[in-house]
Each structure stands twice: as C-alpha cells, then as structure tokens.
Amino acid sequence: MWAGRFSLAGLVAVPTFMALVALTGMRNQYADLVAQFTAPAFFASVALGIAFLLFRKRRWAAASLVPAALLLLAVSPQWFPTASRPEAGAASIRLYSANLWVRNRDVEAIAASIRQADADVVMLIELGDPTAPHLDALIGDYPHRIASPRIDRPNGDVRSVIASRYPLVALPRPDRFEAVGATAMTPLGPVNLVSVHLTRPWPFEESWGQISQTMALDEMLQSLSGPLVVAGDFNSVSNARIGKMVQRDISLRPAAGFPGTWPAALPSLFGITIDQVYVSPDLAFVSRRLGQPTGSDHRPVVTEITRAAP
C-alpha cells in the first residue's frame, strides 16, 4: 500500500517539479532542458487527473490539479505570446516553413504538403541528398529561389532553400550556423526572410553551441532594416532559454506555439514546438497552423503574416 502511494505521489511530484523549474526562469542547461517539455507535461498531468477520477481517487485527482495549473502558467507564454495586432484591411503573405529531415526520401509527401499549403513563400531546411535532386518537383511553382551551399554534416549533407512567388534578393550568409536569407518584394513591401537551423541543445551538443549561434544570428540581423521574418528549427521552444534570447536580445515575436511540431510520430498535443516562426514588431500573425506531413520527424508550419497596426 505504501509503495502504491509513493508511486502515485511521484506521478504528481515530477510534473510539479518541472513546472517550478520552468517558472523560475533559470538559464542553466538543466533548467532549459526541463522547460522544453512543459507542454506535453501539462497534457500528461490533465490525463493523469482524468485517470484518477475514473478510478475514483478524488483526492489524487485534486492533487493533480496543482501541477496542471503550474504547468499551464509555465507554458502560457509559449501558447499566448506577446503579439502585434494585425492592421485592418492590410495585405498578407502566407509562409510555409519545414525541417524536411536529412534522410527523408518521401518526395511525393513533401510536394503534396507544399501544394496543400499554397504558400507565397516556402522556407526549407535539412534538404538532404535524397531529395535535393528533386527540387524542381518540390517547388516548381516558385520561380524565385535562393539556396545555401551544400553543408557537410556527420549524419548527411544538407541545404537550406527559400522559394518565393515574389522576386528575391540574396542576403549575406553567415558561416557560423546553418542559415540562408533573402529580401522578398511582397505586397507588404520588401520583407527580409531568414531560414535558420540551430544546433541541438545540451546534452546532445555543448550548452554554449545554441547560445553562440543565437548571438551570431543577432549579428547577422543587425545589418538589416525593415520587416523581418525568421523561421526554421530553433531546437528550442519559445519560452525556454534560446527562445527568450531571440525575444529579448533580437526583439522578435514568436507565433503561438500550439500545437507541437516535434516529434511528428506523436500526436501534436504531446509534441514540442521547436519549429518556430518569429517576426519583427512591425509585422503581425493572422494565423498559424500545422502543414500536411512530409515524411520528416518534424511537422511543417504554415503562417499568415501581415502588417502590424500602428
């Protein structure tokens, strides 16, 4: 009996601990890793409370409300971020951004996903050797394209691509992280577009890696003027350490991070949103949704973007 109670207490204590760590805002690598998983932990806590009710353990169900409430508080900046208000009647552009996964061979799924989104701008990262030869089949409807050089990586060579229905002018490409940038001549006027892929967080890579790449992104963007969209795989949710750096130091605002984008094998409720779209304060999000599956371990993101109200 005591062992059973101890196990039940652990089921409540673990998500409570996660919520408290996330709410402290600590910037060390351990707290950052915990903060990545507040969204799935919230839904797991809700499911736990429902399970307690089904087994008529009302006291334990009431106890599970504590971590659920704390986790909802912790994850709310990710789901309900500070956002500019759209300008009434302004034109908008639709953006499709996706991590295709370096070993993905499903060209048909990728092409179908891009067609279904019917976006004005397509931003792709981790375009690997199996799919790169089929680029025309993937983005044949987009006459304007800018791509990064082939990047050698231990798990396979990749490229990043921006394809657009609007004319593009290439931006200088950084050499300290995977990125490609362009200025698009859109109905909103010139809009700077940057597609990025930051390294994985600790413990998969050194803790300094993501931080130094975010600083390099900041340096790259300092030379740009006018509206800015930065999209891609940040390997961080918007309310964890790297997401906070992007908002605090680069002054960009994220799209709402629900539902989750990774891993695609799980229901999106239990995914985490590491595939982000950030915009400068002079732009606003009209909508954000997940795109059709591509065969990747990431879900694509489709956003509608317009001018921000004065």
Image (tube, grey):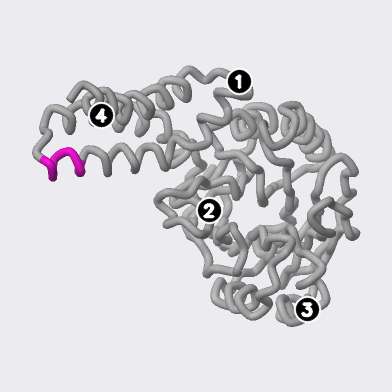
Magenta span of residues: 50-55
- Where the C terminus falls, by quadrant? top right
Amino acid type shown at disc 4: Leu
Mark 4 crowd level (few <14, some 14–19, many ≥20, 10 Å Cα): some
- Along the horizontal axis of the image, is 295 left or right of 227? left
Q: Position of residue 15 (x, y in %)?
A: 37, 29
Sequence-wise, the earlier of marks 3 and 4 is: 4
Query: Which residue in the protein does label 1 denote?
Result: 27
Q: Which mark is residue 8?
A: 4
Q: Which mark is residue 134?
A: 3
Query: Which residue in the protein does label 2 denote?
Result: 261
Mark 2 crowd level (few <14, some 14–19, many ≥20, 10 Å Cα): many
- Residue at 53%, 65% (x, y): give it: 291
Mark 1 crowd level (few <14, some 14–19, many ≥20, 10 Å Cα): some
Counting the numbered discs, the total is 4
Amino acid type shown at disc 1: Arg
Badge 2 marks a residue whose secondary structure is loop
* Distance of label 3 from label 2 (alpha carbons): 24 Å
Q: Position of residue 53 (x, y in %)?
A: 13, 40
Badge 1 marks a residue whose secondary structure is loop
* Distance of label 3 from label 4 (alpha carbons): 52 Å
Amino acid type shown at disc 2: Thr
- Residue at 44%, 22% (x, y): give it: 23
Quadrant location of residue 19?
top left
Question: Which numbered mark, 2 or 4, is in the foreground of this view?
Answer: 4
Instruction: Give whichever of 20, 285 is nearer the camera.
Output: 20
Sequence-wise, the earlier of marks 2 and 4 is: 4
